[in-house]
Amino acid sequence: MITARTIRASVALAMLVFYQSDALLAQAVAPISGYELQVYLAGVEPTIGLPTQTSAIPLTALTCALPVVVRPANVINPRFVRFADPANPTTADCQVDRSTFLLALPVGTGYLGTLTALSSAGPSARSGPSNSFGLASVPPAVPARVGFLP
């Protein structure tokens, strides 16, 4: 027989289970263990296309708690990757030097990048696309000590 007391107990139990489920979900977020940078050629849509190159970014390579800076629309020969600091996403940035990786890409323009956070629970979804960047050939260094000998 269903009574008002049975209904109240069932509602209280349902609310308790729902509350506990939310608490468990909040605790289940795995800490970030690193990042992966994905680079796409001009014309490739990052949401559906495959990256041309990827680069693992360990947490130890990051400098965080930096002031937020405006990203220019296009950068030639970039050195750094910068993104919102997960500890303070609205007020701070993290930065990592990826010049060796970036400057090893083929010379060209229109590259885009995305970033994925990594954890023991698996990767996050890809970030939105970055500003575009390109690579231009740099002339060789100026020759020094030029002279003629007998």
Image (spheres, helix red, strand yellow):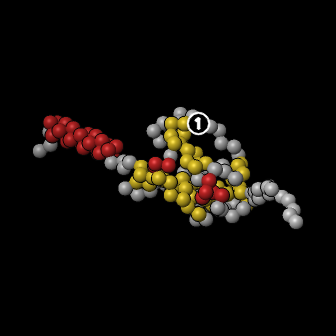
Q: Quadrant of the N terminus?
A: top left
Nearest the eye: 4 or 72 = 72
Measuring 64% from the left and 61% from the top, which residue is drawn there?
104
- Residue 71 is drawn in which quadrant? top right
**Residue 51 percent location from the top left of the image:** 59, 63
Q: Quadrant of residue 109?
A: bottom right
Give percent across and percent down for residue 148: 87, 62
Q: Nearer the viewer, residue 91 or 94?
A: 94
The residue carrying pointer 1 sits among few (fewer than 14), some (14 to 19) or many (20 or more) residues within 10 Å by Cα, namely: some
Q: In the rendered image, which quarter is residue 11 located in?
A: top left
Q: Amino acid at mark 1?
A: Val
Position in image of residue 86 (x %, y %): 47, 42
Q: Could you tell me if residue 90 is visible in this image? A: no
- Residue shown at the point (26%, 42%) measured from the top left: 20
- State the residue at coordinates (85%, 59%): 147
Tell me if 97 is positioned left or right of 124 in this view. right
Asked if residue 3 can be seen in this view, the reply is: yes
Quadrant showing the C terminus: bottom right
- Residue for point 20% across, 41% down: 13
| Label 1: element kind | loop
Counting the numbered discs, the total is 1
Location of residue 116 with respect to 6 vertically, above or below: below
Task: In this rendered view, identify the residue nearer to me: 139 or 87.
Answer: 139
105 to the left or right of 93? right
Q: Nearer the viewer, residue 60 or 131?
A: 60
Q: Is residue 128 above or below residue 93?
A: below
Residue annotated with mark 1:
68
